[in-house]
Amino acid sequence: QVQLVESGGGSVQAGGSLRLSCAASGYTISDKCMGWFRQAPGKEREGVANIWAGGGIKAYADSVKGRFTVSRDNAKNTVYLQMNSLKPEDTAMYYCAADPVVCGTWSGGVWTPSVDFKFWGQGTQVTVSS
């Protein structure tokens, strides 16, 4: 049974940092595209970041570029999301996800992260206060 368990969420002030972790069990991530998406109350799901199996290609939403960094440790079967310079608009439930229909979309010279995944975790709440 595939399990993705997120941790590291919390409440911070604007400008602060958080590091989210996603530990996978029952599922080997080494050859899988992994990602993070978020959803705030009353808003649509937003793809935040994708990372290709080899880790060499990463896709970020425009809203987080330059502030968030996605990484993976295949030996630990874990994916991370380092979030710096957090803003109140980053407040949302953050979900780790695996095995998207496509690993990002190439358009206009940039990769856009996916929002449709086969598996995702229960989520971890991130709240940023001004």
Image (cartoon, rainbow, N blue to C red):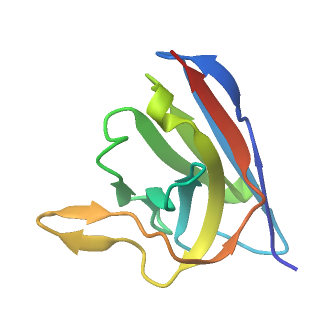
Residue 27, x across and y down, in percent: 77, 75
**Which residue reaches farthest front?**
42
Say which of 8 and 125 sits in front. Answer: 125
* Horizontal side of residue 31 vs 25, given as left or right: left
Residue 25 appears in the picture as rendered: yes
Residue at 59% in and 43% down: 92
Residue 30 appears in the picture as rendered: no
Q: Is residue 9 above or below residue 55?
A: above
Q: Is residue 94 above or below residue 20?
A: below
Say which of 8 and 14 sits in front. Answer: 14
Residue 61, x across and y down, in percent: 35, 52
* Horizontal side of residue 5 vs 71, given as left or right: right
**Which residue reaches farthest right?**
1
Quadrant location, the N terminus: bottom right
Residue at 60% in and 50% down: 41
**Which residue reaches farthest bottom?**
101
Residue at 72% in and 59% down: 77
Q: Quadrant of residue 19?
A: top right
Q: Quadrant of residue 112?
A: bottom left
Residue at 81% in and 76% down: 2
* Horizontal side of residue 79 vs 49, given as left or right: right
